[in-house]
């Protein structure tokens, strides 16, 4: 039995000095507009956000959406820190399905105030920070008490002091719960999480990215 102590959501990262607020997508389908074709936004090739959208909108919709995003010819990236840093420096203006906690962390360090993080609906989210107690643990009750503490408001507050937007969305007073309050969610939770790896592979295939040919090495 495994518990999830935290959560994460995806958002839109943008440089407001390069892209005005009125031009920033308000829906995920807005990224499919003609003005965003041709190296106009960043996409992480590890598609956790697509898996979250699939949980709420269906796998068929998400795979079709992934193909359409690929057809927009985005700038493919891997990870968050480097791409977000490039946005702060003005190299790129828009990040599709950026990790909200990574975006806000980078924005906090951005003295120019250029980097902004916009949450749009349905808000893609997923469970994370998984923990369990080994059945051979010498002190299982102490371990269970530790896990129980992390689920309390006090425990979530400790997490929030260091990673405010990696707290659990199910903790009513958490920073992340306040961000998504009243918004429609698309959550990759315990009902869909077991399909994540399979779906990530399907989305990656839908991206149509080139693969290395070992025979030509």
Image: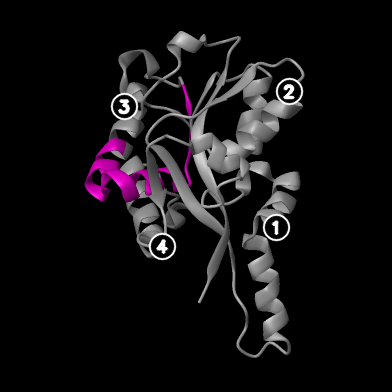
Q: Residue 78: x and y, percent?
A: 55, 41
Q: Earlier in the sequence, mark 4 or mark 3?
A: 3
Q: CA distance from mark 1 to mark 2?
A: 29 Å
Q: Earlier in the sequence, mark 1 or mark 2?
A: 2
Q: Nearer the viewer, residue 34 or 101?
A: 101
Q: Earlier in the sequence, mark 2 or mark 3?
A: 3
Q: CA distance from mark 2 to mark 3?
A: 28 Å
Q: Residue 199: x and y, percent?
A: 35, 55
Q: Residue 207: x and y, percent?
A: 35, 41
Of the two numbered discs 3 and 1 in the rendering, the one whose residue sits closer to the viewer: 1
Q: Residue at x 52, y 48 (%)?
A: 169
Looking at the rendered structure, the secondary structure element under dot 3 is helix
Looking at the rendered structure, the secondary structure element under dot 2 is loop
Are there few (<14), some (14-19), or many (20+) residues within 10 Å of tag 3? few
Which span is picked out in magenta? 41-65
Q: Main secondary structure of the magenta part?
A: helix
Q: CA distance from mark 4 to mark 3?
A: 26 Å
**Rendered image: mark on residue 190:** 4
Are there few (<14), some (14-19), or many (20+) residues within 10 Å of tag 4? few
Q: Is the residue 75 above or below the residue 133 in the image?
A: above
User: Can residue 79 be seen?
Assistant: no
**Rendered image: mark on residue 110:** 2
Q: CA distance from mark 4 to mark 1?
A: 22 Å
**Rendered image: mark on residue 155:** 1
Q: Earlier in the sequence, mark 4 or mark 1?
A: 1
In the drawing, does residue 212 fall left or right of residue 161? left
Of the two numbered discs 4 and 1 in the rendering, the one whose residue sits closer to the viewer: 1
Q: How is the image coloured?
A: one colour
Q: Residue 183: x and y, percent?
A: 41, 34
Give the residue pinned by disc 3. Answer: 29
Q: Nearer the viewer, residue 192 or 92?
A: 192
Q: Mark 2 touching mark 3, by CB under 8 A?
A: no
């Amino acid at each position: 039995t495994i518990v999830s102590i935290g959560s994460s959501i995806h958002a839109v990262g943008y440089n407001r000095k390069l892209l005005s607020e009125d031009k920033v997508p308000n829906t995920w389908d807005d990224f499919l507009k003609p003005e965003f074709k041709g190296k106009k936004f960043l996409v992480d090739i590890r598609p956790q956000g697509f898996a979250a959208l699939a949980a709420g909108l269906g796998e068929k919709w998400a795979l079709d959406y992934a193909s359409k995003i690929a057809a927009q010819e985005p700038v493919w990236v891997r990870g968050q820190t480097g791409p977000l840093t490039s946005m702060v420096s003005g190299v790129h203006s828009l990040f599709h399905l950026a990790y909200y906690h990574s975006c806000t962390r980078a924005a906090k360090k951005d003295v120019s105030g250029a980097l902004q993080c916009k949450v749009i609906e349905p808000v893609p989210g997923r469970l994370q920070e998984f923990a369990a107690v080994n059945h051979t643990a010498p002190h299982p009750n102490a371990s269970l008490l530790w896990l129980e503490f992390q689920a309390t408001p006090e425990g979530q507050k400790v997490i929030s002091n260091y990673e405010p937007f990696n707290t659990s969305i199910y903790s009513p007073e958490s920073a992340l719960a306040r961000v998504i309050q009243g918004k429609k969610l698309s959550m990759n939770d315990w009902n869909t999480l077991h399909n994540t790896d399979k779906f990530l592979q399907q989305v990656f295939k839908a991206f149509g990215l080139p693969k290395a040919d070992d025979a030509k090495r």
